[in-house]
């Protein structure tokens, strides 16, 4: 089922932005990409009979890189959206929403996007969070208020903006926000409920024939129990799905 051009190489390059723990981040050696997506990528490779190289790539550059066939897959907490499906194909494998996080001491009370008006929010460039924040900034302006949206090249820089006081609200996918809070030694807390649950997708160059093979491999991992074991390892089991699809965007 793997296309001949890829099978003949015997290996695939998977692009991931290693700043989005626990989904993808650098391990103790400072160079190996680890996390949920890295483990799933290696497991998919075993099912497909392909070696896997997970490479650190700035998030905003992954889809253009797939379109230019620099990479074979993108596994970097991509929300599968109708807009992105115009650029690449997706195989869904997880679900997550967006969460707000703030300083635990003195941080604002943010329960919805509307509460962002009057604040400074940090996001990673190219993410769903950036899109949502910028749309909310337009709404705030229409209401005679302001919203400063600060987009950073990686999640680590976005978190630093919150720590340093340049921003007073951070936004990230719900498992990532929860992990940032857990690792902050009490500096951050999640504010309000998450919103906008949507599927994550493995991004694939459009029309290269790889999507059916990836779908079959994801189903194999689910049937064998390997999928849930990986999610359990990283404490993200609430995001598990049971019905992966090709291009399963809901909006």
Image (cartoon, helix red, strand yellow):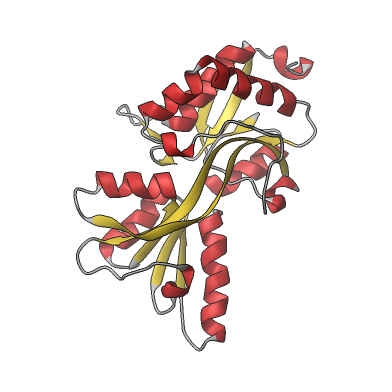
Task: Give left or right: position of 213 versus 237.
Answer: right
Q: Residue at x 57, y 85 (%)?
A: 142
Q: Position of residue 141 (x, y in %)?
A: 53, 83
> Looking at this view, is 26 or 168 the one in front?
168
Which residue is painted at 71% across and 13% down in the image?
7
Q: If the image is split into quadrants, where does the N terminus sit?
A: top right
Which residue occupies 35% across, 47% down? 178
Q: x, y percentage for residue 90? A: 67, 37
Quarter holding residue 192: bottom left
Q: Is residue 78 above or below residue 10?
A: below
Relative height, residue 214 to residue 158 (above, below)? above
Residue 66 visible within the image:
yes
Q: Nearer the viewer, residue 34 or 61?
A: 34
Q: Spot the residue most to the front.
A: 242
Is residue 192 shown left or right of residue 7?
A: left
Q: Residue at x 34, y 31 (%)?
A: 30
Q: Nearer the viewer, residue 220 or 177?
A: 220
Q: Is residue 34 visible?
A: no
Image quadrant occupied by the C terminus: bottom right
Q: Is residue 163 left or right of residue 9?
A: left
Q: Position of residue 220 (x, y in %)?
A: 60, 17
Q: Quadrant of residue 210?
A: top right
Total marks shown come to 0
Vertically, is 88 above or below 143? above
170 sits left or right of 223 in the view: left
On the image, the x and y values in percent for residue 17 come to 49, 40
Residue 238 location, quadrant: top left
Q: Residue furthest bottom?
A: 144
């Amino acid at each position: 089922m793997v296309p001949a051009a890829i099978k003949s190489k015997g290996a695939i390059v998977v692009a991931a932005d290693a700043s989005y723990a626990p989904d993808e981040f650098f391990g103790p050696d400072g160079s190996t990409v680890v996390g949920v997506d890295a483990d799933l990528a290696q497991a998919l490779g075993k099912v497909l009979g392909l070696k896997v190289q997970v490479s650190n790539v700035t998030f905003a550059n992954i889809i253009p890189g797939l379109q230019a066939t620099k990479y074979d897959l993108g596994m970097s907490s991509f929300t599968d959206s109708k807009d992105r499906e115009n650029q690449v194909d997706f195989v869904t494998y997880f679900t997550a929403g967006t969460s707000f996080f703030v300083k635990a001491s003195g941080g604002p009370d943010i329960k919805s996007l509307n509460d962002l008006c009057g604040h400074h929010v940090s996001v990673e460039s190219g993410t769903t969070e950036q899109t949502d924040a910028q749309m909310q900034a337009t709404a705030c302006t229409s209401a005679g208020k302001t919203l400063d949206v600060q987009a950073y090249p990686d999640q680590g820089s976005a978190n630093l903006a919150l720590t340093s006081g340049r921003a007073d609200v951070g936004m990230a996918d719900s498992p990532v926000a929860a992990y940032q809070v857990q690792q902050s030694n009490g500096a951050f807390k999640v504010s309000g409920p998450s919103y906008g649950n949507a599927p994550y997708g493995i991004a694939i160059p459009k029309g290269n024939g790889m999507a059916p093979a990836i779908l079959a491999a994801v189903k194999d991992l689910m049937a064998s129990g390997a999928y849930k074991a990986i999610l359990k390892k990283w404490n993200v089991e609430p995001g598990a799905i049971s019905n992966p699809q090709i291009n399963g965007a809901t909006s």
